[in-house]
Image (cartoon, helix red, strand yellow):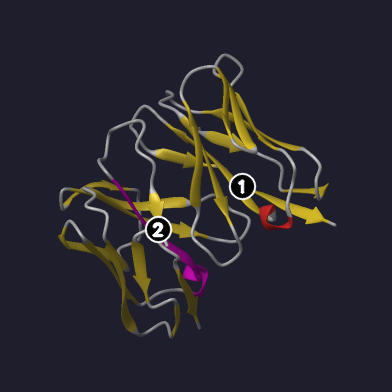
Amino acid sequence: GQNIDQPTEMTATEGAIVQINCTYQTSGFNGLFWYQQHAGEAPTFLSYNVLDGLEEKGRFSSFLSRSKGYSYLLLKELQMKDSASYLCAVRDSNYQLIWGAGTKLIIKP
Amino acid sequence: ETGVTQTPRHLVMGMTNKKSLKCEQHLGHNAMYWYKQSAKKPLELMFVYSLEERVENNSVPSRFSPECPNSSHLFLHLHTLQPEDSALYLCASSQDFGDPYNEQFFGPGTRLTVL
């Protein structure tokens, strides 16, 4: 079966750095997405990786290793507004998005 | 504001009621999606429409019936639901279905409670 694993919850301190991991087992691979979802709001797109390596976008970076079935989202200079759930999703060989259950990130002052 | 709107935002219904969820996208996209989001569970894809044709139906019970009258609108008709159907129902759109890069734009969701 297809599976996406990510931690259920993480806590970090304002101004610090946090890394949210995602491992996947899917039938085929056509890219990996990270989305942010604030409580009660729509998920919003953060990043897309299809090749191995690091993609940097401001305070957020996303890394992919296809051989390991592994990705992480790195958030730097954490702000209180970064408190949200972070969803990892992989597009499989049928072009469907397979989603993880999300990681709830709690930022403390 | 993602360009995808959903109404109503909240809905409480009995098991014998019939109701409909509405989604509208203002992005000129060709693909639209219905997802179910339950607490601490992955998003579950329910239906996909591409150019108003249904392309995916992931073993969804017949008490959920989608309708896509045009590329901008998507409905989810509900009837004789069960309490376990209570969840957040999210609508999304993307430029095309089948393009690996296409990100999906989500609406704010309808919080459904079935009594």
Provide the chain ID for the residue under circle 1. A
The span shown in magenta is B83-94
Assess whether residue A87 is covered by the magenta stretch: no
Q: Amino acid at mark 2?
A: Thr
Could you say where residue B54 lies in the image, as x and y percent from the top left?
20, 50
Residue under the image location 58 percent in, 36 percent down = A4
Q: Is residue B101 above or below residue B35?
A: above
Q: Amino acid at mark 1?
A: Tyr
Quadrant hosting residue B13: bottom left
Which sits in the foreground, A104 or A25? A104
Q: In the rendered image, is residue B37 in sight?
A: yes
Numbered mark located on residue A73 in the image = none
Q: Which residue is mark 2?
A: B2
Residue under the image location 56 percent in, 67 percent down = A40
Q: Give the spatial CA distance, label 2 vs label 1.
A: 17 Å
Quadrant hosting residue B75: bottom left
Q: Which residue is mark 1?
A: A86
Left or right: residue A2 compared with residue A75: left
Density class for disc 2 (Cα within 10 Å; few <14, some 14-19, many ≥20) is some
Left or right: residue B20 compared with residue B69: right
Majority secondary structure of the magenta segment? strand
Q: Is residue B76 above or below residue A26?
A: below
Residue under the image location 47 percent in, 39 percent down = A98
Assess whether residue B87 is covered by the magenta stretch: yes
Q: Secondary structure at mark 1?
A: strand
Which sits in the foreground, B16 or B71? B71
Could you say where residue B35 lies in the image, as x and y percent from the top left?
41, 56
Residue under the image location 59 percent in, 30 percent down = A62
Provide the chain ID for the residue under circle 2. B
Left or right: residue B58 compared with residue A104: left
Q: Is residue B107 above or below residue A8?
A: below
Could you say where residue B55 lies in the image, as x and y percent from the top left?
22, 45
